[in-house]
Amino acid sequence: LVNAAGEEYPDMKIGVMSDLHFQVAQGTAETTVPAMLEQFKADNVSVVMITGDIGYACEEAEYEKFWTAWNTVFPDEETAPELLVVSGNHEFDRAVFKKETYEEAIERYMRIFKLDELNQHKVVNGYHFIGINSENESTHGLYTEATTTWLKQQLDAAVAENPNNPIFVTAHQTMPNTTYGSEWDSFQKSNSTAPLYEVLKDYPQVVYFAGH
């Protein structure tokens, strides 16, 4: 494959997962997620992106199950793929039901996934991967000027490095009228990802992944 400038792309394989929904009780994720990770390992992917809802009720035991699966398949941190995760609405279930605050949910999420910064920008084999997180606990997410300003800065930095390479961006919520389910009335009324779209539409090299 070559890019718009006729340059050959470096070899790159990406694994993408969403809505794993690990639960404290035994569920299907205990078999499906390890199987998917094993497939990613067999395919020698360089990056694994998880677009939110790793757990179902944001209990620590649910995330421990994810790390058990990950560390079983990729026991060597040096050879494991780069992991990029973003939060989904289920990461805030306890906040939705007023059992904790959004800030407490985010603190736990960042601690469990060893994040210094909530939004992530990683470069792997010359490709840029950007992960965006909702600014509150609402089901359809909230993305304000704080997030869109940061996003534009990251995109501009990626374009400055190589304007011809794709840039991979992920958040949990979909863009309206793009995939199955994104046309639902609740999405249209909330219009939560409209601020993201207003930024992304000026970057045709962006490949956007979502779940929900």
Image (tube, rainbow, N blue to C red):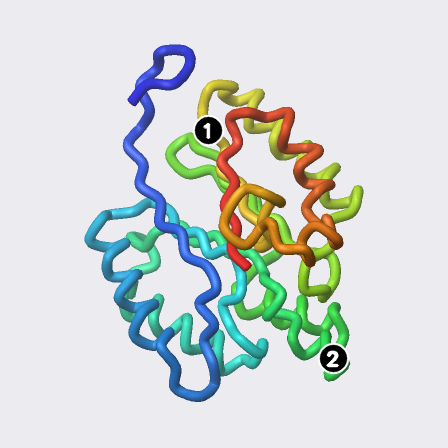
Query: Quick one: SS at disc 2?
Result: loop
> Toward the viewer: 184 or 89?
184
Q: Quadrant of residue 32?
A: bottom left
> Toward the viewer: 55 or 47?
55
Cα distance in 3D space between marks 1 and 2: 39 Å
Residue visible at 79% across and 42% down? 145
The kind of residue on which mark 2 rests is Glu
Asked if 63 appears above or below 158 in the picture, the reply is: below
Q: Quadrant of residue 39?
A: bottom left
The quarter in which the N terminus is drawn is top left
Residue named by callout 1: 166
Furthest-bottom residue in view?
25
Residue 117, visible in the rendered structure: no
Q: Residues within 10 Å of mark 1 (few under 14, many from 20)?
A: some
Q: Residues within 10 Å of mark 2 (few under 14, many from 20)?
A: few
Residue 124, image x, y percentages:
41, 38
**Among the two numbered marks 1 and 2 on one chain, the one whose residue lies closer to the N terminus:** 2
Asked if 26 appears above or below 134 in the picture, the reply is: below
Query: Quick one: SS at disc 1?
Result: loop
Residue 127, image x, y percentages:
44, 33
Residue visible at 48% across and 64% down? 19
Asked if 84 appears above or below 162 in the picture, the reply is: below
Q: Quadrant of residue 203?
A: top right
Residue visible at 45% across and 75% down? 22
Residue 7, image x, y percentages:
35, 15
In the displayed structure, does residue 39 sit left or right of residue 78? left
Residue named by callout 2: 100
Residue 15, image x, y percentages:
35, 50
Asked if 198 appears above or below 108 in the picture, the reply is: above
